[in-house]
Amino acid sequence: MRAILAAVIVVYASLVVATAQVRERDNGWMVPPNASAKQNPLANRPDAAAGGAKLFQERCATCHGADARGTEDAPDLSQADVQAQTDGALFWKISTGNSRSGMPAFSFLPELQRWQLVLHLRQR
Amino acid sequence: MSPRRIWSLLTALVLVNAAAARAQDSPYFVTYDHYLEEPGNLEIALANTSGMPRGGHPTYLAPWLELEYGVKGWWTTELYLEGVSARGDGSGFSGWRWENRFRPLRSEHRINPVLYVEYESINEASRIQKEIVGAGPLSFEPIADLRQEHMHELETKLILSSAISGWNVSENVTFEKNLTEDEGLEFGYSVGVSRSLGGLASGISCRFCRETLVAGVELFGGLGTSHDYTLRETRHYLAPVVAWRVSDRSTLKASTGFGLTEASDRYLLRVGWSYELSLRGRR
């Protein structure tokens, strides 16, 4: 029992040290043209943005910050280069993630909820 | 230092470093999908398998503790500690497992492969049945005797998982090798289908509503061994599963597994609770 507890402490300590990692931006993360051209079906539903704001706080704020201005773990989503991307490109990036930069895939969320997140990002 | 003090210290360490983190939504107990733990997040899960065997054997409980950590976006590692208790028999520690999952592709595709490698140091009393491989029913000798029979096993899985129009479809193929005895390679499978019950998210926070629920079903079982390529006496289960995101940090899930063959237990009831923390220490 004592050996197991010691092992757990060692593992935990290693994990804390490992968390010093910083997520890096991946400039090679290219959106396929057909995905980029997709239109947001909620573009004319500004009322749906409130749900997007809630989802953002639940799913994204830990890394991107409550105001989406970024943290040392993930970029500022109000930046011009993010806002210059099409709705379809943002939807694709939210859906598919990027395992190299540490961005999780959110394809497990219903499609409409991912579009709500895009709607919310447009208000940053 | 007593074990109690060590556990208290561990708990304090986790809480000091913790910040809120999103909870993952997978409702499966056996099937793995392609969603890995976020880098820097630690998920602590407590779960239990309650088995109701055929043939008058006593019901049993097999609880386990799971510590899952996202090392990188493409690598998740996990430690399991498990136990067992049977009515009128006994109880005890049944072993530990160290699991690693690797996602080789950067972004999501139609089919997303994940490679899984696990080392198990368990004994014959292990009954959590996180995977089922090989053939034959569980052994119902006294737990004290079964705990004397230690095994070192290496398990690998190929996980294939897809997100299709709001559905998750996952297929796992399992290969297990007992390093202690020559039992050949043991094979198993698991298939799961699930989806979130939510549509458009409301702007108000809700604790128990459709958008916090995920439902599905999984089918899993053994596929014999390399010494005997038949399905004779293999165990198979069909299990509806449901997960409820209780809060941003925690998820409760449950399933009822129905044994489909004579070698299977009649029912496997599972319940699990997980709590997710960000060890990065930021909100």
Image (cartoon, coloured by chain):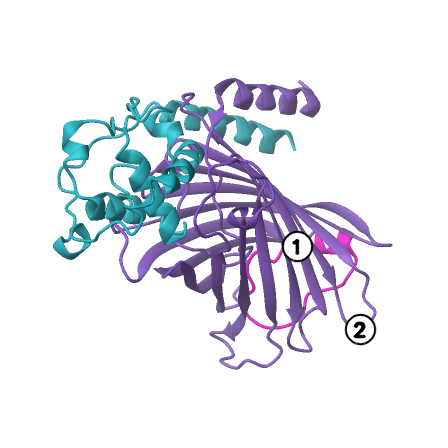
Chain colours: A cyan, B purple
Classify the position of the C terminus of chain B by image quarter: top left
- Which residue is drawn at the image coordinates 19% and 27% (left, top)? A79
Check residue B135 for magenta coloring.
yes
Q: In this rendering, would A122 be left or right of A59?
A: left
Reading the image, the residue beneath label 2 is: B55
Q: Position of residue A30 (x, y in %)?
A: 14, 46
Q: Given contact means CB atoms under 8 Å apart, are the residues at marks 2 and 1 in contact?
A: no
The amino acid type of the residue labelled 1 equals: Arg
Q: In this rendering, would B144 be left or right of B240?
A: right
Q: Is residue B65 visible?
A: no
Nearest the eye: B183 or B206: B206
Q: Report, in whole angstroms, how far the alpha carbon at label 2 lies from the one at label 1.
A: 21 Å
Element on which disc 2 rests: loop
Reading the image, the residue beneath label 1 is: B270
Q: Which residues are magenta?
A: B128-147
Classify B126 as above or below A46. below
Nearest the eye: B276 or B244: B244
Labelled disc at residue B206: none
The amino acid type of the residue labelled 2 equals: Gly
Magenta region, main secondary structure: loop
